Amino acid sequence: MTRGEPSKTASHAKNEGCLTLSELVDRAPEMTGAERQAILEILDKISEGARDVARRLAMGPLHGLTGSSGHLNVQGEEVQAFDEIAQDTFSGLLGASGRVAVLVSEEREHPETFPCPGPSFYVAMDPLDGSSNLAVSGPVGSIFAIFRGAGESLRDPAKAVLDSASDVVCAVYVLYSVATLLVIAFRNEVRMYALDPVAEGFAPLPGKVRFPDGGGQIVSINSANYTRWDAGVRRYVDALHSRSSWSGRYVGALVMDFHRNLLKGGVFLYPGDLPKDGKGHPEGKLRLLFEAIPMAFIARAAGGLATNGKTPILDIPATHIHQRVALVVGSRERVLEYCHLAGAPEPV
Ligand code: AHM
Ligand code: MG
């Protein structure tokens, strides 16, 4: 694959509504020429890593790589073998790009810093989201937020990333499922690319990605936590149960659940839950930098909304790299409905 130019072998690539990566970056708002080149190179590295991770995931069961690595991560969660493989793959590629000055990851306690001669960016990533699904060959993902670097000396890289977290330039997720999809958002549009495993490149799919008209009817939430939610969330779920016009769908991999709701219409929720038997996530389970901010940015670019139930996700101050938040993200209609029924302020 030529740098920044996804494979065009798939038939849909001939459609006029398709954009190569470089065409997409050229249309993105508010960037200098040098920044566009840097972003294109970062996206190129993410594509290369996604292609590699997809190939290795497909071989995972044959190599016995579907279980735990035997370690716990910084947050005390079991690290799967593929969490480490994806971490090393993306960290290696992004670090060597000369375009990423700081990389923070769900899998690393501290930021990594890299030499960066020109315009630089900071990247936050969840290298393998939903990795517990690998035990059953279920879908998983990778998530990236790209922030504009402040261009200062990096005496405190963690602070530099936190200070830049409100300045998202681009957000990306990769879905590894029956197909491998790359979904890229700038402020003005969301585009989708599919991996052609024969040509070994990503080919563009036609058209902008938007939540469907009407906002859809799908609700994705882990209902096993019902008794540990606050009254507003329980009221919302109770109200859904008295209706016929909704469907519950939950895979347990944010990328998959979000992606379905983006294409079909719906909302994903992971609210805070009160601790019980030593388990629980009172602030929410998902991470602000690695999961909530990139998905909120993509949702907004696709016409949707995201909130923690009090504040729009993209307005929450980032105070800690591994900060957790409650997350309600999806179509505008479904998120506003949640706010109405749960008694939460509207995130607009
Ligand atoms: P991970 O990034 O460590 O895999 O954890 C995040 C995952 C999300 O993908 C998913 O939405 C959520 O955790 C599922 O959690 P639960 O099993 O508690 O429903
Ligand atoms: Mg995750």
Image: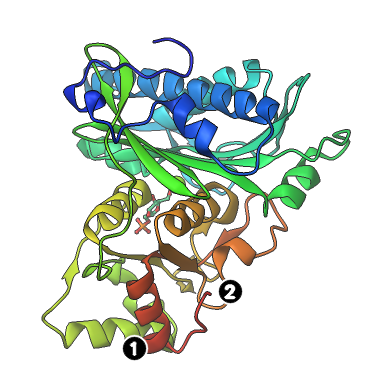
The kind of residue tagged 2 is Thr
Percent from the top left, x then y, of residue 261? 28, 58
Quarter of the image for residue 200 reads: top left
Residue receiving disc 2: 311
In the picture, measured across the screen, residue 274 lies left or right of residue 192, that is: right
Residue under the image location 37 percent in, 51 percent down: 254
The kind of residue tagged 1 is Arg
- Asked if residue 43 can be seen in this view, the reply is yes
As helix, strand or loop, the secondary structure at mark 2 comes to loop
The one nearer the camera, 206 or 81, is 206
Q: Earlier in the sequence, mark 1 or mark 2?
A: 1
| Cα separation between marks 1 and 2 | 19 Å
Q: Quadrant of the N terminus?
A: top left
Residue receiving disc 1: 235
Percent from the top left, x then y, of residue 28? 54, 40
The one nearer the camera, 183 or 208, is 208
Residue under the image location 40 percent in, 61 percent down: 303
In the picture, measured across the screen, residue 45 lies left or right of residue 163, that is: left
**Label 2 crowd bin: few (<14), some (14–19), many (20+), radius 10 Å:** some
Residue under the image location 58 percent in, 74 percent down: 311
As drawn, 265 above or below 104: below
In the picture, measured across the screen, residue 280 lies left or right of residue 257, that is: right
